[in-house]
């Protein structure tokens, strides 16, 4: 006895539907791969854009070792990564105020723009272009320490800077395109192991009783010593590190980290006749 036609037709329809489901799954898989590839390419493009912005800063490596220089340590920088919605972001008080309040955090404490401005001031200074900046270190509020190479040109806009910092904290290092040179790299604590022995470690605080003229202060330091300047990169509070030898105030008024760095650079530029 043969099977009814309706039963056969039903089976064929099921096989055809299964075929369509398989084709649809393959298309969705290809779309997911395309999206993933585009995200990776976008991340790599951000790094490439930073590398393309690198200027040709005239630094004579052989001459650096024979001259004293300056090292900057930016302490307590607000660079915290969190998952907001479906993406990971660097938290800031302007874009994530509601998120921070929801998690019982003070939005005023999340100011990654401070370290952005401070790095711009250091790396764009004539002092750096003359090759007198030896190194730049940044330590976050969470205790993560990373190094920024003096020849890096920091992105001008905060959005691009935040993208670079996000990649750094996730990947631990960022290389120059087509080279083995690490532009940014996360390193082990403490920062003191990277500081030269022949250096004077100077901290800055408005609450310090020692108010000085920065130009006269750096002029009085021995010529063969390197300077280590420890500057707070946070909105409120002060730096209190044990390795700092001297805490000074360079103004009778509270100043931003960027303006404090500008005064430091100007004092050294006058001392070393850098125009």
Image: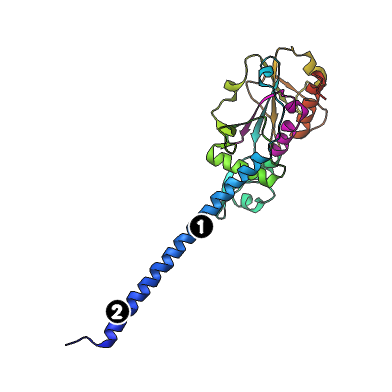
Q: Quadrant of residue 77?
A: top right
| Residue 175 vertical position relative to residue 85 in the rendered view, above or below | above
Please say whether residue 239 is visible from this viewpoint.
yes
Say which of 201 and 254 sits in front: 201
Q: Describe the element under mark 1 as helix, strand or loop.
A: helix
Please give the name of the residue rendered at 60% of the width and 36% of the height, measured from the top-left corner: 176
> Is residue 43 left or right of 114 when viewed as pictured?
left
In the rendering, at what x and y percent does residue 227 appear? 70, 19
Residue matched to label 2? 11
Say which of 228 and 28 sits in front: 28
* Quarter the C terminus occupies: top right
Q: Which residues are magenta?
A: 114-141
Q: Quadrant of residue 240?
A: top right
* Quarter the N terminus occupies: bottom left
* Label number found at residue 122: none
Question: Is-magenta flag for residue 128?
Answer: yes
Please say whether residue 143 is visible from this viewpoint.
no
* Label number found at residue 34: 1
In the rendering, at what x and y percent does residue 5 appear? 27, 87
């Amino acid at each position: 006895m043969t099977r009814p036609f309706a039963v056969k037709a039903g089976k064929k329809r099921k096989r055809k539907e299964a075929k369509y489901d398989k084709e649809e799954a393959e298309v969705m898989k290809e779309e997911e791969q395309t999206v993933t590839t585009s995200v990776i390419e976008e991340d790599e493009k951000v790094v490439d854009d930073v590398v393309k912005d690198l200027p040709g800063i005239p630094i004579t490596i052989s001459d650096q070792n024979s001259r004293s220089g300056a090292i900057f340590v930016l302490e307590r920088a607000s660079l915290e990564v969190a998952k907001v919605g479906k993406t990971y972001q660097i938290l800031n008080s302007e874009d994530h105020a509601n998120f921070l309040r929801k998690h019982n955090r003070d939005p005023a404490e999340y100011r990654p723009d401070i370290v952005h401005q401070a790095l711009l001031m250091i790396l764009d200074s004539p002092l750096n272009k003359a090759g007198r900046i030896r190194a730049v270190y940044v330590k976050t509020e969470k205790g993560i320490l990373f190094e920024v190479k003096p020849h890096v040109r920091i992105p001008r806009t905060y959005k691009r800077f935040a993208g670079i910092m996000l990649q750094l904290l996730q990947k631990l290092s960022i290389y120059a395109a087509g080279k083995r040179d690490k532009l940014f790299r996360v390193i082990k604590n403490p920062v003191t192991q990277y500081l030269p022995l022949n250096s004077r470690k100077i901290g800055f605080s408005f609450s310090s009783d020692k108010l000085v003229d920065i130009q006269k202060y750096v002029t009085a330091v021995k010529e063969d010593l390197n300077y280590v300047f420890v500057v707070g990169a946070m909105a409120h509070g002060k730096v209190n590190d044990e390795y700092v030898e001297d805490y000074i105030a360079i103004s009778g008024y509270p100043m931003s980290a960027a303006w404090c760095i500008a005064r430091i650079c100007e004092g050294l530029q006058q001392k070393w006749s850098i125009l």
